[in-house]
Amino acid sequence: MAANAERASDAQILAAARALLAARYVIALTGAGMSVESGIPPFRGPGGLWTKYGEPPMNGYQIFLADPKKAWEDRIRRQDDELWGPLKVARPNPGHQALAELEALGVLRFLITQNVDDLHRQAGHQALAEIHGNWKLIRCIECGARFKAEEIRLDVLPPQCPQCAGLLKGDTVAFGEPIPPDVLRQCVDHAALADAVIVAGTSATVYPAAGFALEVKQRGGQLIEANLYESEISRVCDLSLRGPTGEVLPRLAAAVADLRRARLS
């Protein structure tokens, strides 16, 4: 399959850049494909962690609530396993940086990521919602406050929220856990404003994240895909840009910048 992988043409990149500049409010939805390009293993598919070791229990949140002390002990013990290890050393790739550049240009107004790897933040992105949480953060499940991991003492488990003394857990959303309401509200609000979506490194099949992109398309907005291979949403996309996001997105950001300069000159 890799031998038959396509590469977005310059004409396709230019068409996508024009569509973004013509839009009033552009958002992006990113997924695991971008993480993989930074060396983070996927969960599903060949080489995926769940493929190798089996999927985690579908009631992970309920397991946490039943014995939060044990859940915290397990979290501490896993700090160097096959998931946490790569997360610690991963760095933003050119695709992350390109999306941050589109934000700096004022073109990309908001980003929704399904990834927990913190790489969009590290690339300098400001306006984003991490719909599945962030592995570097700790969240109070009662008041919703978030803290950097190093801000929370772990000498007593489970730790308590410094603000409300509530129960703390990792910010990453477990199976069976509701999406935090503050994050969900951000996604709903920005998707309602959008008339164009960049879908990068994801087949947009996991809900509720996928729904935000498809909602824009259903309202008549532009759906622009950047993905290595054809995905389950390719058939409804207005433009599908083939190739690694670390290659496609920098080309797209450069084309947007060039068009803007030409219009201003």
Image (spheres, helix red, strand yellow):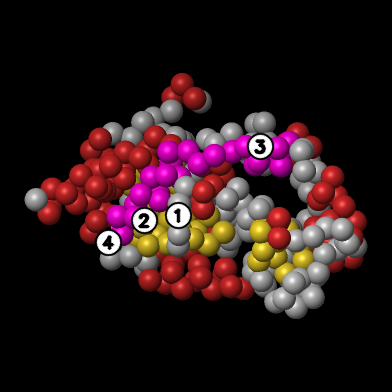
- The span from disc 3 to disc 4 (Cα, nearest Å) is 37 Å
The residue segment tinted magenta is 82-106
> Which dot, 3 or 4, sits closer to the camera?
3
Position above or below: 43 against 204: above
Per the image, the residue denoted by label 1 is 125
Name the disc covering residue 86, or none: 3
Q: Secondary structure at mark 2?
A: helix
- The span from disc 1 to disc 2 (Cα, nearest Å) is 7 Å
Q: Secondary structure at mark 4?
A: loop
- The span from disc 3 to disc 2 (Cα, nearest Å) is 27 Å
- The span from disc 2 to disc 4 (Cα, nearest Å) is 14 Å
Q: Residue at x 53, y 62 (%)?
A: 129
Label 1 crowd (10 A; few <14 / some 14-19 / many >=20): many
* First in sequence: mark 1 vs mark 2: 2
Q: Residue at x 24, y 56 (%)?
A: 21
Name the disc covering residue 23, or none: 4
Label 3 crowd (10 A; few <14 / some 14-19 / many >=20): some
> Which dot, 4 or 1, sits closer to the camera?
1
Q: Residue at x 90, y 56 (%)?
A: 70
Q: Secondary structure at mark 1?
A: loop
Q: Tell me residue 257's x, y (percent).
A: 24, 47
